[in-house]
Amino acid sequence: QVQLVESGGGLVQAGDSLRLSCAASGRTFSSSAMGWFRQAPGKEREFVATINWSGYGTYYANSVKGRFTISRDNAKNTVSLQMNSLKPEDTAVYYCAARRYRTSSSSDREYGDWGQGTQVTVSS
């Protein structure tokens, strides 16, 4: 099992940037693919970005491609999501998730460990 704690959310204006971080502990972090998901009020949880165990494989939702960047530091057991050019439609609770395999996935059903989430609100 991996324990995950997100941080870095907040209230920003459209066009601003935010950097979310997720600190992991427990099972070997470096062997786990990681993902970021989000859930807006009244909507289902959706995929945002994923990164494989090495950090050299990343994949993004079309809605964030070119604006968001996922990265990881296996020495510090952290994964980050740099969010630029934020839009009001990016408003959601953002969740960090860990997968028990090295390869990444965009399906939330493939992730067994989740953080508590951090709120991101983008005003227009």
Image: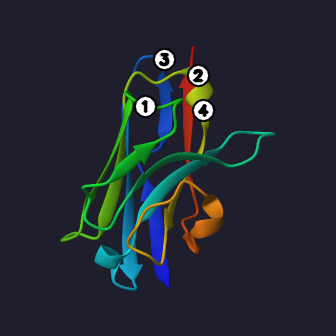
Asked if marks 3 and 2 touch (Cβ < 8 Å), the reply is yes
Residue 18 sits above or below residue 37 on the image: above
Q: Earlier in the sequence, mark 3 or mark 2?
A: 3
> Which residue position is annotated with label 1?
65
Q: Amino acid at mark 1?
A: Lys
Front-lying residue, 30 or 107: 107
Residue occupying the far right of the picture = 42
Q: Alpha-carbon distance for marks 2 and 1? A: 16 Å
> Which residue position is annotated with label 2?
88
Q: Amino acid at mark 2?
A: Pro
Q: Alpha-carbon distance for marks 4 and 1? A: 16 Å
Tag count: 4
Q: Earlier in the sequence, mark 2 or mark 1?
A: 1
> Which residue position is annotated with label 3?
14
Q: Residues within 10 Å of mark 4 (few under 14, many from 20)?
A: many
Q: Amino acid at mark 4?
A: Thr
Front-lying residue, 44 or 60: 60
Q: Amino acid at mark 3?
A: Ala
Q: Alpha-carbon distance for marks 1 and 3? A: 17 Å
